[in-house]
Image (cartoon, rainbow, N blue to C red):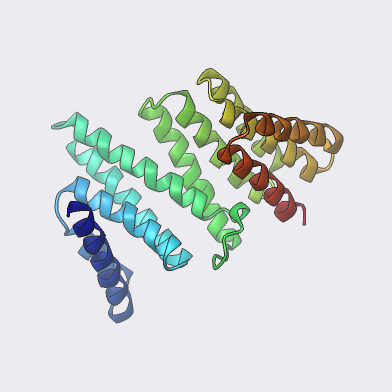
């Protein structure tokens, strides 16, 4: 029963926000969201709304608008309540981290997501979100694996912007953190992306091909659905960014 109500409430918020965008403006919609209750409740609404605009509406402009509004809301609330309630302030920062990671992911063309068109300015916004996600991962002391993921999405954005040196640096940190966290999957993924980046960069193509082949072989040895997904992802990314 609770889950059904959550689905209905989520759909209601999405429809209300779409109506406000049509009849008024983004700021009116943001005012509506910010008035939906306690900070933790509002933060979750932002997070779900961003996901719905991406997956259901395929509306990247709205994804960016409400991601940045949600992130700013969470960070400001964290500052406001830090002296009185450290735990709640940490929770708000964590929500900002979740939204920033998703924003960095949703503005990345490597997924080749149908219905999503990404401009260079979108990439710049995504890179900024990736930087924030990494900073918050350190500030919140989330551990090696979240740091590995944070460095990966940072590297992915640098790759999309053709900043290959920074991409390789970020993917290398991602690999190091994955090893530290004993995460074989992210270790192989980072290795694969280092290989892909070197191939696309051109000056280290042979070395990159060897690293990519080794990563794909490692995924095949794991023989899982996730491993197969990552193999296809690496192939797709190489195809997209090599053109």
Q: Percent from the top left, x then y, of residue 187?
A: 60, 27
Q: Which residue is painted at 49% across and 47% down in the image?
A: 128
Q: Which residue is painted at 51% across and 35% down in the image?
A: 149
Of residues 131 and 57, the one drawn nearer to the viewer in this rendering: 57
Q: In this view, does 27 lie above or below 200?
A: below
Q: Percent from the top left, x then y, of residue 159?
A: 66, 45
Q: Percent from the top left, x then y, of residue 188?
A: 64, 30
Q: In this view, does 161 lie above or below 59?
A: above
Q: Which residue is painted at 20% across and 30% down in the image?
A: 86
Q: Is residue 46 above or below residue 188?
A: below
42 to the left or right of 172: left
Quarter occupied by the N terminus: bottom left
Q: Percent from the top left, x then y, of residue 177?
A: 54, 24
Q: How many marks?
A: 0
What residue occupies the far bottom of the structure in this picture? Answer: 23
60 to the left or right of 6: right
Quarter occupied by the C terminus: bottom right
138 to the left or right of 222: left
Q: Is residue 206 above or below residue 156?
A: above
Q: Which residue is painted at 67% across and 29% down in the image?
A: 221
149 to the left or right of 110: left
What residue occupies the far front of the structure in this picture? Answer: 223
Q: Would you identify the image quadrant in which residue 59 lies?
A: bottom left
Of residues 212 and 140, the one drawn nearer to the viewer in this rendering: 212
């Amino acid at each position: 029963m609770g889950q059904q109500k959550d689905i209905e409430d989520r759909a209601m918020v999405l429809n209300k926000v779409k109506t406000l965008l049509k009849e008024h403006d983004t700021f009116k919609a943001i005012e509506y969201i910010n008035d939906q209750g306690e900070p933790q409740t509002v933060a979750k609404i932002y997070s779900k709304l961003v996901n719905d605009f991406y997956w259901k509406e395929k509306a990247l402009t709205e994804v960016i608008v409400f991601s940045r509004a949600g992130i700013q809301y969470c960070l400001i609330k964290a500052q406001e309540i830090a002296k009185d309630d450290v735990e709640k302030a940490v929770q708000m920062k964590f929500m900002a981290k979740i939204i920033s990671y998703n924003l960095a992911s949703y503005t990345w063309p490597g997924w080749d997501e149908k219905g999503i068109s990404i401009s260079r300015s979108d990439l710049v916004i995504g890179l900024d979100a990736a930087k924030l996600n990494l900073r918050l991962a350190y500030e919140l002391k989330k551990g090696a694996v979240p740091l590995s993921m944070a460095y990966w999405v940072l590297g992915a954005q640098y790759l999309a912007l053709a900043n290959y040196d920074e991409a390789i640096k970020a993917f290398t940190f991602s690999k190091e953190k994955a090893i530290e966290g004993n995460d074989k999957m992210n270790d192989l993924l980072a290795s694969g992306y280092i290989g892909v980046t070197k191939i696309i960069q051109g000056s280290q193509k042979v070395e990159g091909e060897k690293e990519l082949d080794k990563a794909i072989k490692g995924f095949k040895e794991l023989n899982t659905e996730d491993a197969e997904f990552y193999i296809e992802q690496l192939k797709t990314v190489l195809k997209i960014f090599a053109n």
